[in-house]
Image (cartoon, rainbow, N blue to C red):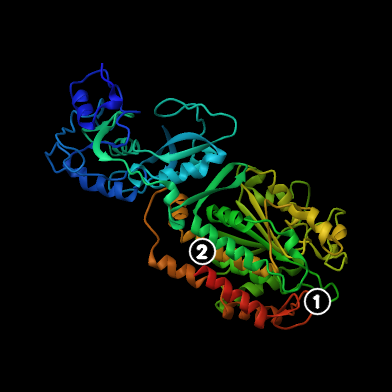
Amino acid sequence: MWQSESLSPSALRSIIRLQSRDIKNTSGIAAGYQQANVVILHKDLADDFEEFCRANSSPLPLLYRTKCGEWSCGPLATGTDIREDCPEYCVFENGILMKKTSVACIRAGQFNCPMVVTMRPVPEDKLDAAAQSTHVIPLAHGAPVHIGDPKLLGIQDLSQPDYGDPVKQCTGDVPVFWACGITGVEAVQSCKPSLAFTHSPGCMFITDQKAETISPRTLEPAQCPLSFCISQNPQHYSIASKRAVQQIRAIEELVVEDPGSRGIRALFLQDELLKASLSLSHSSSVLITTGFPTHYMHNPPEETDGPPGAIAMAAMLQALRKEVVIVTDERALEMNQHIVRDAVKKGVIKTAVPVISFQSNGPDSALHFLCRDGDPTKPRFDHLVAIERSGRATDGNYYNMRGVNIKHLVDPIDDLFTTAGNIAGITTTGIGDGGNELGMGKVKAAVKAYMPNGNLIACDVSADFAITAGVSNWGGYAVACALYVLNLCPIHWRYLHRGLGPSLTPDQLSLWTACLPTVAKEEEMLHILVKYGVRSGKTANLGLEVDGLTFHPYHSDIIQRLRNLTL
């Protein structure tokens, strides 16, 4: 009997080569040394498999490719014979023979399969440590590819893994998933070769290469992953680098400036911008609503705060290949459709956004609007965003900041947010600057305590995330900038794509940069609003003004400072 923990990799391979049953698998032995997956294929398939590995480097980091007829692995270990140095092999004849996901690997030639992952339950307060300690070893699959509900990976039951044994979870643990080299086994099965070999799960090739020992504590901010919960239904965490998080926090601090001295800082919750933007980054279809008819004595009654921020968010979301729809009051539908058309014509946004309305025709109207056939398992949208949208107060009315009831001008779009709260997979965000806006019910206690007329005007409808800004448009600009920062963060980009696929391309970067808010575009947007008679919220002036602040120097300065923090 050998004490395997005290033996060198070479000695362990020698024991394995003797076909000793003392080493049934390589789990827990050769600590500090890298272990490798093994795939042996016909030479005609080798190029395709190498391409497959390079396209799917998280589950299949390519350590070495032997030449035809070469059975040693010189760069990885001396004195080896890859045919005998694993405790057990799988033999595939015509492709017949952990948990598989529904996440498809990038196809290469005949190789096309879902990714396989390993899962470890991790206490919530240890998630950052788990991400950081594995991020530093990319050749051993690197950082997690998913944290949270396994169903988001297409895994229905953790108690029935496709490979290995189920893992017990304790109260407070979060499932954390890493890409797994058994993906190579799935790839071999997918191409159905006449003959192929792989290591058996858990029976890996022990190399002489020392495992990387970089301490997570020495990581630079750009290389230090941090995790954030972005949904509890289903449970879902996202990851970004410490540097990206710091950038977004600086953006958040900028837009909460209060030039009108309205006291909105009392409504501020840190990291709401970050978490909302992380959630939006993971989304595929986003519904945006805006429109606050504060000027009930004018036609139209809308104000200039809201639509510019909505268009700025839509532009960036479109650039990130999300589907975007805007919902507004039936009364203002045609005007808003014309505003979007003009925004495209003037280059404020590249592609027109569909503008629709919502009318409540019964108790299930919101459910049928949000979900196909009214089925809550088939949502049309995975994120709702309200920006400077009049929100329903506790008494069922809608109030402007002066305490005037404007309910007769507002359609019940709030119903979409309250209904979404009961549908798994739909996240909501509210952006406001006074507390009477849709979604700001999350901070209604602070609104009632600190805002003028707070007890009357406070919105009662909460969102998952409530972004407070000095002017709501600034919150919309901030979301666009935060999305840009996140998708330029290699750590977030990798996590977003489950560790699969190519890196960011120059064309993508150019498109995203062009879709950021600029002083020129936002000034043009205000000209469009003025053309349709939309007025400044505080003063009702018909000019280049938002909430009583002229575009120059106030808004133009914020936009330029946002760009300075973003680029």
Q: Which residue is mark 1?
A: 299
Name the residue located 65 percent from the left edge and 43 percent from the top edge: 376
State which quadrant residue 508 falls in: bottom left
Q: Is residue 302 left or right of residue 311?
A: right
Q: Is residue 555 left or right of residue 223?
A: right
Q: Nearer the viewer, residue 356 or 151?
A: 151
Within-10-Å neighbours for mark 2: few <14, some 14–19, many 20+: many
What amino acid is found at the position of numbered circle 1 in the picture? Asn
Residue 386 rendering spot, x and y as whole percentages? 69, 60
Residue 292 rendering spot, x and y as whole percentages? 76, 67
Distance, label 1 to label 2, CA atoms, is 37 Å
Q: Quadrant of the N terminus?
A: top left
Q: Which residue is mark 2?
A: 484
For label 1, the SS is loop
Q: Nearer the viewer, residue 188 or 132?
A: 132
> Which residue reaches farthest top?
1
Residue 391 rendering spot, x and y as whole percentages? 78, 59
Name the residue located 46 percent from the left edge and 69 percent from the top edge: 511
Residue 221: mark: none
What amino acid is found at the position of numbered circle 2 in the picture? Tyr
Q: Is residue 196 left or right of residue 457?
A: left
Determine whether 60 is above or below 81 in the image: below
Q: Nearer the viewer, residue 118 or 314?
A: 118
Residue 329: tell me if it is visible. Answer: no
Residue 210: tell me if it is visible. Answer: yes
Q: Is residue 92 left or right of residue 455?
A: left
Name the residue located 25 percent from the left edge and 47 percent from the top edge: 50
Residue 549 rendering spot, x and y as whole percentages? 72, 78
